[in-house]
């Protein structure tokens, strides 16, 4: 297990791109409420990634979905996310107006929409499941779960420093970062789809 899953996850989650959303949703929060939101959203992001890494394949088996089909579908989803990022939009920014309105009226918006779907949506979930299939040993599965810890720590750091980051980078800087991550994600998406297609249609391998 190399660092490709970690790079892919960081590209999809891209907590820097979610900083403006965090600032928007936590307007009027006290310091303690904001810290609680940071903690809950980080733990929730880890929980989603760890769950997909540990039992994601079992869920596919329950629904009789082949991994090759899931790779092609997941790759298409990653490519769609990458295209959104190339347009300087967060990969997982799929919250509806109703979700945003509901979340704004709650005491805590850490889980919805900050964690799901802004941080860990379908693209990140499918990515973890695909890499979980490639993990053959306990240590490789542990590494995948460990990458979830890294993503959670990166999320906590970005959210905790949200206002200084937003002031330092500005919207232009955040957009540039999002586009760069989108380009990396697009290349990884094509590779995931290619592997799935070769499994479904072995003749493509030549």
Image: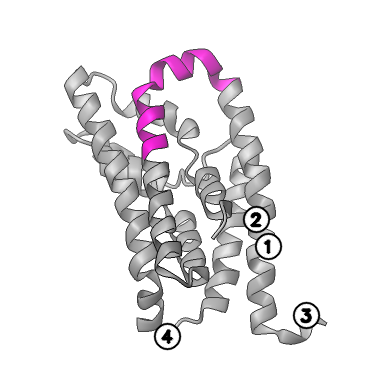
Q: Residue at left 29%, top 53%? A: 47
> x%, y% of residue 19?
43, 28
Asked whether, in this view, residue 46 is left or right of residue 15, the answer is left
- Residue with the most extreme right position: 206
Query: Label 1, label 3: how many angstroms apart (C-alpha)?
Result: 13 Å
Q: Quadrant of residue 72?
A: bottom right
Number of other residues with Cα within 10 Å of mark 1, as a class: few under 14, some 14 to 19, many 20 or more: some
Q: Decide: marks 3, 2 in contact (CB < 8 A)?
A: no
Q: Residue at left 17%, top 22%? A: 32
165 inside magenta stretch: yes
Q: State how the image is colored.
A: one colour
Q: Decide: marks 2, 1 in contact (CB < 8 A)?
A: yes
Q: In the image, is residue 67 above or below residue 105?
A: below
Q: Which residues are magenta?
A: 153-172
> x%, y% of residue 195?
66, 71
| Element type where label 1 sits in the image | helix
Q: Return the mark for residue 64.
A: 4
| Element type where label 2 sits in the image | helix
Number of other residues with Cα within 10 Å of mark 3, as a class: few under 14, some 14 to 19, many 20 or more: few
Q: Return the mark for residue 182.
A: none
Query: What residue would you read off at disc 3?
Result: 205
Query: Label 3, label 4: how many angstroms apart (C-alpha)?
Result: 25 Å
Quick one: 138 or 18, which is closer to the camera?
Answer: 138
Query: What residue would you read off at disc 2?
Result: 188
Query: What residue would you read off at disc 1?
Result: 191
Asked whether, in this view, residue 67 is left or right of residue 88, the answer is left
Number of other residues with Cα within 10 Å of mark 2, as a class: few under 14, some 14 to 19, many 20 or more: many
Residue 95 showing in the rendered view: no
């Amino acid at each position: 297990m190399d660092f490709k899953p970690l790079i892919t996850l960081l590209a999809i989650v891209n907590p820097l791109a979610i900083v403006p959303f965090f600032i928007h949703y936590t307007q009027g929060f006290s310091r303690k409420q904001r810290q609680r939101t940071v903690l809950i959203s980080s733990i929730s992001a880890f929980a989603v990634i760890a769950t997909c890494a540990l039992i994601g394949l079992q869920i596919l088996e329950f629904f009789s979905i082949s991994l090759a089909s899931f790779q092609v579908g997941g790759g298409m989803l990653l490519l769609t996310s990458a295209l959104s990022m190339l347009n300087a939009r967060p990969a997982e920014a799929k919250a509806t107006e109703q979700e945003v309105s509901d979340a704004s009226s709650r005491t805590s918006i850490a889980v919805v929409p900050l964690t799901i779907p802004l941080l860990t949506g379908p693209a990140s979930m499918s990515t973890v499941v695909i890499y979980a299939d490639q993990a053959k040993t306990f240590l490789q599965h542990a590494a995948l779960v460990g990458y979830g810890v890294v993503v959670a720590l990166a999320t906590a750091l970005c959210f905790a420093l949200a206002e200084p980051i937003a002031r330092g980078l500005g919207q232009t800087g955040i957009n540039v970062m999002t586009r760069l991550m989108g380009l990396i994600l697009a290349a990884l998406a094509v590779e995931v789809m290619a592997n799935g297609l070769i499994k479904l249609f072995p003749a493509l391998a030549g």
